[in-house]
Amino acid sequence: MPSPPAETFVFILPSIHHVLRGEKLLKKAGLDFDLIPVPKEVNPDCGMAIETGPDDLERVRAALNGAGLSIEAFYRRRGKVFDLLD
């Protein structure tokens, strides 16, 4: 079993509805991503987020933006450390 990447990227969208639309879009595009619970280190409220590795980062971001899905926050994740990016 391969080890997870040293860093991943987490997209926080405004609602579960947007996350599910993003999931459908990203699956159709054949991109590598996971749906994860919003990390408590980022937001204590429940919800789902989209996580991807560095290889698909730009394609995932472009697909979400191209579909008009608003990205509320974008983080680089290294273990349990989250850095807010633009």
Image (cartoon, rainbow, N blue to C red):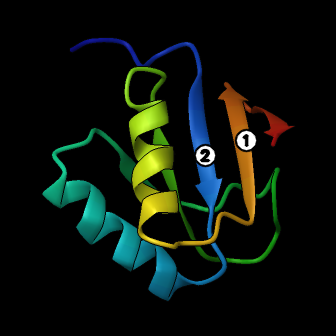
| Residue 49 % position (x, y) | 55, 61
Q: Earlier in the sequence, mark 2 or mark 1?
A: 2
Q: Which mark is residue 75?
A: 1
Q: Nearer the viewer, residue 26 or 44?
A: 26
| Residue 57 % position (x, y) | 48, 33
Give me the C-alpha separation between circle 2 and circle 1.
5 Å
The residue located at (77%, 77%) in the rendering is 45
Residue 60 location, quadrant:
top left
Indicate the amino acid at tag 2: Val
* Dot 1 crowding, Cα within 10 Å, few <14, some 14–19, many 20+: some
| Looking at the image, residue 34 lies above or below residue 8 | below
| Residue 34 % position (x, y) | 37, 49
| Looking at the image, residue 44 lies above or below residue 85 | below
Residue 78 location, quadrant:
top right
The residue located at (69%, 55%) in the rendering is 39
Counting every numbered tag in the picture gives 2
| Looking at the image, residue 65 lies above or below residue 48 | above
Q: Secondary structure under badge 2? A: strand
Q: Secondary structure under badge 1? A: strand
Circle 2/circle 1 CB separation < 8 Å: yes
* Dot 2 crowding, Cα within 10 Å, few <14, some 14–19, many 20+: many
Location of mark 2 (residue): 10
The residue located at (39%, 68%) in the rendering is 22
